[in-house]
Amino acid sequence: MKRKDLLKILINNGCILLRNGSKYDIYHNPKKGTTQPVPRHNEINEILAKRSLKI
C-alpha cells in the first residue's frame, strides 16, 4: 500500500499527526486513545498497513 493512501485513510478516521520522527511519523487516534508509528517509506507492507488501520 502506498504511504499517501494509508495516511488519507488514517486522517479520514480521525487520526492526527502527533509528532514527526526521522524514520517514523507517530499518529494518534483521540477517539480510541491509541498511537501508531507509520514508517516514512513510499511503499508500506500490507501487514503493517492492516495493523495501522486498526487504531
Image (tube, rainbow, N blue to C red):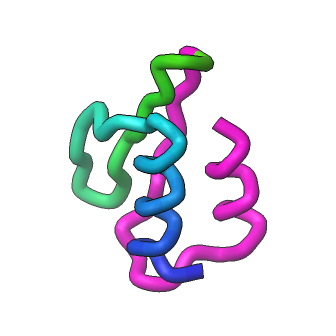
Task: Classify 3 as above or below 14.
Answer: below
Is residue 34 left or right of 15 when viewed as pictured? right
Task: Classify 55 as above or below 42.
Answer: above
Q: Is residue 53 magenta?
A: yes
Which residue is pictured at 60% across the width and 80% down the height?
1
Q: Quadrant of residue 45?
A: bottom right
Q: x, y percentage for residue 41?
A: 41, 76
Q: Nearer the viewer, residue 7 or 40?
A: 7
Q: x, y percentage for residue 51?
A: 72, 51
Which residue is pictured at 63% across the width and 50% down the height?
52
Q: Is residue 47 magenta?
A: yes
Task: Classify 22 as above or below 15.
Answer: below
Which residue is pictured at 22% across the width and 46% down the height?
20
Q: Residue furthest front?
A: 12
Q: Nearer the viewer, residue 54 or 42?
A: 54
Q: Nearer the viewer, residue 8 or 3?
A: 8
Magenta segment boundaries in residue numbering:
33-55
Q: Quadrant of residue 24?
A: bottom left
Q: x, y percentage for residue 54?
A: 72, 42
Q: x, y percentage for residue 26?
A: 38, 41
Q: Quadrant of residue 22?
A: bottom left
Q: Nearer the viewer, residue 44 or 15?
A: 15
**Count of numbered tags:** 0
